[in-house]
Structures are given as structure tokens and as C-alpha cells.
Image (spheres, rainbow, N blue to C red):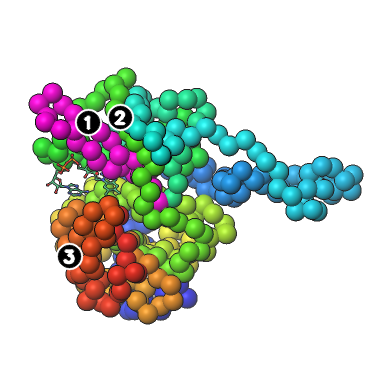
Amino acid sequence: MFARQVLRPAHVLKNHVRRYATEPPKGNNYNAALFGGIAAAAGAGAYYYMNMDGVAPRNKERLGDQSAAQGSPSSRREEENIPAKVDKPMMAFKGGDQGFISLELESAEDINHNTKRFRFKLPEEDSVSGLHVASAVIAKYQGPEMEKPAIRPYTPVSDEDTKNYMDFVIKRYPDGPMSEHLHSMNPGQRLDFKGPIPKYPWEPNKHDHIALIAGGTGITPMYQLARAIFKNPKDKTKVTLVFGNITEEDILLKREWEELENTYPQRFRAFYTLDKPPEGWQQGKGFITKELLKTVLPEPKEKNVKVFVCGPPGLYKAISGTKKSPQDQGELEGHLKELGYSKDQVYKF
Ligand SMILES: Cc1cc2nc3c(=O)[nH]c(=O)nc-3n(C[C@H](O)[C@H](O)[C@H](O)COP(=O)(O)OP(=O)(O)OC[C@H]3O[C@@H](n4cnc5c(N)ncnc54)[C@H](O)[C@@H]3O)c2cc1C
């Protein structure tokens, strides 16, 4: 079974999630476009996985028996288990001493009342971002009135092997210097980015079961992780998402999560909770509570579990304790500590 810990209350909650998942998606061009892209990426998942380290895929069907009989170079390679080298695309973000690079905004599209999808062009044609999972970029902006630049991390929602551009989903915070600036930008304008900023290095099957606890735009690093897991057929990790938002409209990447639930019902579960639920909302109400986490998360004593947390400062405080700095995760506190998880079992983005 997916999770012994999914007790009766969770089952009820789950039914609500299912009911929710079958609702027709609201008209949203962004989601439709992104969803199409993700589906394509998922289809190409096996290829990508093998390609990540420059190894070509073994497509036995395409090679066929004939080429094997003729002892073609590719069949010999297969027999001798010699990987074929393929050219890796150029990477825009190289890390090290590369510094900031300026990217041109190609488009900005409303997703909801305070969130936009931004597409930034990569400088070289046919290049990829160069980001690995999990990693982010930092954006830098200094307005005329600002004493020092604002520097903020962002995780793209586009795939790591997407060529020519990167997509970001970014929410505007009132008086937030970076998000206000981004939301005021027009196509053709440029912004400085640097990366990759390494976060939690993921390897297939690194953990048996991971839990993703997110609030608001804290969902983007979680999406990067889940996308990498589910597009790799060799990665069998189970994933439980707990996603808190203010209103239903604020649930970002909703269709993508629903698609994962429908495609991998034994390995992926999503639980939503809203501060201001609409009438008839049958899932979680209010903040992410200790009771909800106890019901839906893999138990701390389960083998090789990891819990990831990302969201607004209040969410960290209540759930995991705050992160001290990029290098210092700080002490584990809050609900996760009270539920018996160890510091090693929790990663704060
Ligand atoms: C690893 C990582 C990845 C991130 N990826 C994204 C992303 O893809 N999209 C995105 O929109 N944001 C993302 N963020 C948050 C982003 O870095 C900024 O914090 C956010 O854009 C606000 O910056 P600002 O300068 O506009 O406002 P700030 O002046 O930094 O903050 C304005 C107000 O908003 C609050 N606040 C800051 N961040 C958050 C938050 N995440 N949730 C709720 N309240 C907050 C602050 O406490 C403050 O009250 C990510 C953060 C991390 C750590």
C-alpha cells in the first residue's frame, strides 16, 4: 500500500481531494500551455534521464532485430555495454565565478489576481538553463531609490531540459521590491540572474518516501522535485504533498498536481487546505495543522523518509522552525518536531 499512515480521516480527506481533482479545470491559458509542456516532458522522460549524463537512450524497438543481426555499431555498443556519447546542450547558468547574467523578458501572463508567469529568454539559442534538481536562481534588482539591490531566489517551473527559455511563476507582494519590480516589467526589458544555487541534491530513489509541505509560492521548489521524480521511470519514490493557500484561486500548478495524482495514484497523494475556503469546500480548512500532518505524512519511523518545507515565514515557524541562513538549516521545531521527526529528516528550502 502507498501509505499505512493514511488512516480513516485521511481517506475521507482523500475522497475530497479526488472529488476536487475531477472538477473541470478553470480556463487558464497558462496552465493549459504548461500542462501540455509537462505532458510532453513526461513523455520524453526516459530519454531525458539517460541523456542527463550524456548517454544516449537504448531504443531497442527502433534498432530492431535486423540491425542487431548485422552487428551495426549501435548493436555492438549495446552488446558491449558501451554508452554512445551525445552532445550536451549549452548551459546558460554555469555557477562558479560566472556572476549575474542578464535575461530578456519574453512574455508575462496573468495566472490569477496576484501571480504571473514570466518567460525569460536564455542568451544562446538551443541552450538549456543548466539547473539541476533541486536548485534555484537568484534575481537581482536595484531601483533608483534603493540603497542596495534586492536579491531573491526563484525556482523555474519549466523543465531542466527546456531549450531557449525559463518560465517562472511569481507572486506579487505589496511593497515587495523584487516581486513588485517583476510585475511592472514589460517584454523586452531585462533582469539579472545568477545560478544554479544548489539546494537539496536529488538522486533517483534517494528516499523511499518524501513529503512536500508548501505554502503559496513555496510550491515551485516542490514542483521541481516532483517533476524530476515522476519523469524518471527508474525513480520509484513515493510523494505526499500538503499544500496550504489562502483561496482556491491561489493553488498554483493545480492541473499538474491533479495529473500526477491520476497517473501515479499509488505513489503520489495531494492534500490541500485553504484559509478562506469557498462554500462547499470539502478539504482542509485553515492553516496546515499538526493533526493534518499526523494523518497524511509518512511516519517518522518509516524507512528513509524526508520532509521538505517551503513557504512564507509563518509556515516555517509553525511547521519546522525557521531556517537561519542558506548554509544553516536551524533547529527543527514546530509540528514536525512534535510529531517525532528528526532534524536530519527535514529540509527547509
Ligand atoms: C528556494 C526558493 C524559491 C522561491 N521560488 C519562488 C517562486 O518561484 N516564485 C515566487 O513568487 N517566489 C519564490 N520565492 C520567494 C521569493 O524569493 C521572494 O521571497 C518573494 O518574491 C518576495 O520578494 P519581494 O522582494 O517582492 O518581497 P519581500 O520584501 O522579500 O517580502 C515582502 C513580504 O512578503 C513576505 N514574504 C516573502 N516571501 C514570501 C513567501 N514565499 N510567501 C509568503 N510571504 C512571503 C515577507 O515576509 C514580507 O512581508 C522562493 C523562495 C525560496 C527560498
Residue 55 % position (x, y): 64, 46
Q: Quadrant of the C terminus?
A: bottom left
Spatial separation of the CA atoms under disc 3 and disc 2: 33 Å
Q: Secondary structure at mark 1?
A: strand
Q: Is residue 336 left or right of residue 79?
A: left
Q: Secondary structure at mark 3?
A: helix
Q: Secondary structure at mark 2?
A: strand
Give 9 or 102, whichever is nearer the viewer: 102
Q: Is residue 191 left or right of residue 196?
A: left
* Contact, mark 2 vs mark 1 (Cβ under 8 Å): yes
Above or below 254: residue 128: above
In the image, is the residue at mark 3 within 8 Å of ligand 1 by its beta carbon? Answer: no
Q: Which residues are magenta?
A: 134-159
Among the two numbered marks 2 and 1 on one chain, the one whose residue lies closer to the N terminus: 1
Mark 1 highlights which residue? 141
- The mark found on residue 318 in the picture is 3
Give 347 or 246, whichever is nearer the viewer: 347
| Type of amino acid at the residue the image marks with label 3 | Ala
